[in-house]
Image (cartoon, grey):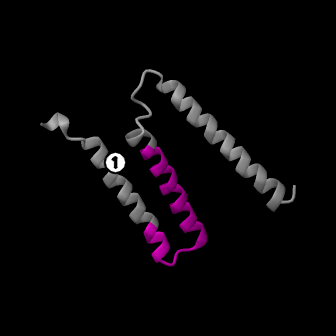
């Protein structure tokens, strides 16, 4: 019976709820902007990684190297797009 219980998914769900609670703490307490944004960004990236690994089973196939390479490539493209937009529109360079 123990093999049938999805312990990994339940623990991932509990950890996801804890990360959401930490993000809500930032909202309800009056924190400085830099502290709040640091906590929010950290919890957002942790939760995204948790969702990929636990619930989307990113590392459970034979081609997990290709999957993680595509994730890193997508993250790099997203960061270049975000910082390029900030560079052009906000920082006037």
Is 4 left or right of 23, judged from the image as shown? left
Corner quadrant of residue 62: top left
Q: Is residue 78 above or below residue 73?
A: below
Name the residue rendered at 48%, 48% in the picture.
48
Q: Which residue is mark 1?
A: 12
* Numbered circles on residues, count: 1
Nearer to me, 61 or 84: 61
Rendered image quadrant of residue 69: top right
Is residue 17 found inside the magenta-colored segment of the image?
no
Q: Residues within 10 Å of mark 1 (few under 14, many from 20)?
A: some
Furthest residue to the left?
1
Is residue 49 within the magenta segment?
yes
Residue at position x 45%, y 41% in the image: 52
Residue 60 falls in which quadrant of the image? top left
Check the image and report above or below for 60 versus 81: above
Could you say which is closer to the camera, residue 40 or residue 35? 40
Tell me which residue sits at (20%, 41%) in the image. Answer: 5
Q: Position of residue 8 (x, y in %)?
A: 29, 42
Which contiguous range is marked in magenta?
24-51
Please give left or right for residue 43 compared with residue 88 in the image: left
Element at badge 1? helix
Residue 93 is situated, as x and y percent measured from the top left of the image, at: 87, 55
Above or below, 29 against 58 in this view is below
Residue 37: x percent and y percent?
57, 64
What quarter of the picture does the N terminus occupy? top left
């Amino acid at each position: 019976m123990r093999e049938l219980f999805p312990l990994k998914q339940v623990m991932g769900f509990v950890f996801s709820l804890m990360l959401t609670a930490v993000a809500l703490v930032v909202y309800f307490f009056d924190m400085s902007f830099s502290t709040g944004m640091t906590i929010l960004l950290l919890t957002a990236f942790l939760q995204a990684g948790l969702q990929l690994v636990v619930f989307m089973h990113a590392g459970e196939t034979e081609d997990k190297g290709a999957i993680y390479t595509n994730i890193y490539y997508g993250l790099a493209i997203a960061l270049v797009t975000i910082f390029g937009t900030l560079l052009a529109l906000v920082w006037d360079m």
